[in-house]
Image: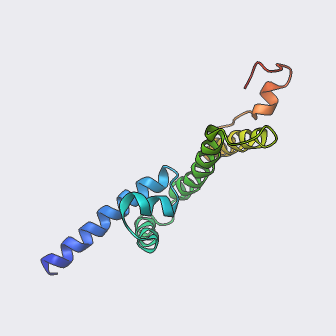
């Protein structure tokens, strides 16, 4: 194989690993494209490259689902922190964050008690 082709493959593999790290941190494809300078199509292709090298493992599937759950949490937290939510929708966003975090814990075999159950009987003591 010619040296330029080897270097192109190495570059794509480095990009694939970088894209995968962003995805595992909960970034969307559009977010990753902005961060890396790749197109959305290139990001999707790099993600499929990393999945093909890790194909079929239960852990990889859990990791992919966890990344999606992280994205849900991140978006909900950004909306809460923005201060733009009125009091009628703020509780639902907090519930989404808590429930999604609980689902992520279950995904990895960690049992978590729902926030609503913990806070019952404590009034406002538990946020």
Q: Position of residue 88 (x, y in %)?
A: 82, 41
Q: Position of residue 120 (x, y in %)?
A: 84, 25
Residue reaching furthest left?
Answer: 3
Q: Position of residue 81 (x, y in %)?
A: 61, 38
Task: Identify the image quadrant of the N terminus.
Answer: bottom left
Residue reaching furthest right?
Answer: 121
Q: Nearer the viewer, residue 6 or 54?
A: 6
Horizontal side of residue 24 vs 66, given as left or right: left
**Residue located at (41% from left, 72% from top):** 42
Horizontal side of residue 42 vs 94, given as left or right: left
Horizontal side of residue 30 vs 12, given as left or right: right
Q: Position of residue 5 (x, y in %)?
A: 20, 78
Q: How many marks?
A: 0
What is the basis of the colouring in this image? Answer: rainbow
Q: Nearer the viewer, residue 57 or 39?
A: 39
**Residue located at (58% from left, 51% from top):** 71
Q: Is residue 126 above or below residue 28?
A: above
Quadrant for residue 87, please give it: top right
Q: Nearer the viewer, residue 98 or 88?
A: 88
**Residue located at (70% from left, 35% from top):** 112
Q: Is residue 42 above or below residue 66?
A: below
Q: Is residue 7 above or below residue 99?
A: below
Horizontal side of residue 93 vs 46, given as left or right: right
Q: Nearer the viewer, residue 54 or 122?
A: 122
**Residue located at (78% from left, 43% from top):** 89
Task: Identify the image quadrant of the C terminus.
Answer: top right
């Amino acid at each position: 194989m010619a040296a330029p082709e080897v270097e192109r493959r190495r570059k794509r593999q480095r990009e694939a690993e970088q894209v995968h790290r962003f995805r595992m941190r909960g970034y969307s494809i559009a977010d990753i494209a902005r961060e890396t300078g790749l197109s959305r199509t290139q990001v999707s292709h790099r993600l499929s490259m990393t999945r093909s090298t890790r194909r079929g493992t239960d852990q990889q599937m859990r990791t992919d689902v966890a990344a999606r759950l992280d994205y849900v949490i991140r978006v909900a937290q950004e909306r809460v922190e923005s201060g733009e939510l009125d009091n009628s929708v703020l509780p639902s966003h907090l519930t989404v964050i808590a429930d999604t975090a609980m689902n992520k814990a279950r995904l990895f075999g960690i049992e978590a008690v729902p926030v609503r159950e913990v806070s019952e009987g404590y009034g406002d003591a538990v946020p």
